[in-house]
Image (spheres, helix red, strand yellow):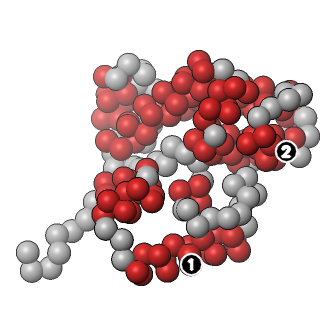
Amino acid sequence: MRSDGSVQSFLASIGVGGDFGKYCGELDGRLTSLIDALISLAEFPTALGGLVEFLKQFGARKDWPSERYPKARCAVLTAMSLYRDDFVTATSQREVEDVEGRLQQICAALRQKNVLLLPGGALERYLPSFAGDYYKITNEAKNSAIEGELQILARGLTQNEMASRYGALFDLVCCLPSKAPAGT
């Protein structure tokens, strides 16, 4: 997408510059700073305990292999979307708003190119039936959540009920391109 001039033009028009990779890198940097802040906390809100434990299990961040960062950053986004007030308490309003604003801009830019991104981390975070660990997601927990959601959907939900149940996930599904039903 970096070579796609229309994305770069759109990003420039919303004030984030024409270099999408650089902008994403800045978001990664902000998330990494939040990781450092969370790891260094002696005390933190109870709701963030699982996240802090998840991050600390990897040892000193300076020793992390590069493949560790995407999972850690996704975990931070998940916790931030689920426990925003606690996240603000542990870090700051300004830091949370900075990450949210950057992420919203990236999502908007990608949406213009029909690339839909869930801003709150892993897909499982949006499934009310998910009962596993948001940071160490197992296939068993995924499958159980999907089965639970399929059973609920099989009973039938109105569009409003689905919007209420699935939030941003439902909104993105509604944005997916589709063909008109046959015969119309």
Q: Quadrant of the C terminus?
A: bottom left
Q: Residue at x 64, y 69 (%)?
A: 142
Q: Is residue 180 left or right of residue 46?
A: left
Task: Estimate how packed mark 2 is, as few (under 14), some (14 to 19) or many (20 or more) residues with alpha carbons within 10 Å.
Answer: few
Residue 83 visible, this orientation = yes
**Residue 171, how many percent across, how many down?**
36, 53
Classify 167 as above or below 73. below
Amino acid on which disc 2 is placed: Glu
Residue 147's disc is: 1
**Residue 140, how many percent across, how many down?**
71, 74
Q: Residue at x 28, y 60 (%)?
A: 177
Q: Nearer the viewer, residue 34 or 144?
A: 144
Q: Nearer the viewer, residue 60 or 37?
A: 37
Q: Nearer the viewer, residue 40 or 23?
A: 40
- Mark 2 vs 1, N-terminal side: 2
**Residue 22, how many percent across, how many down?**
54, 27
Q: Where is mark 2, residue-wise?
A: 53
Residue 135's disc is: none
Instruction: State the SS at label 1.
Output: helix
Residue 16 picture quarter: top left
Task: Estimate how packed mark 1 is, as few (under 14), some (14 to 19) or many (20 or more) residues with alpha carbons within 10 Å.
Answer: some
* Distance between mark 2 and mark 1 Cα atoms: 29 Å
Classify 96 as above or below 45. above
**Residue 122, how many percent across, how many down?**
60, 53
Q: Quadrant of the N terminus?
A: top left
Instruction: State the SS at label 2.
Output: helix
Amino acid on which disc 1 is placed: Glu
Q: Residue at x 68, y 33 (%)?
A: 86
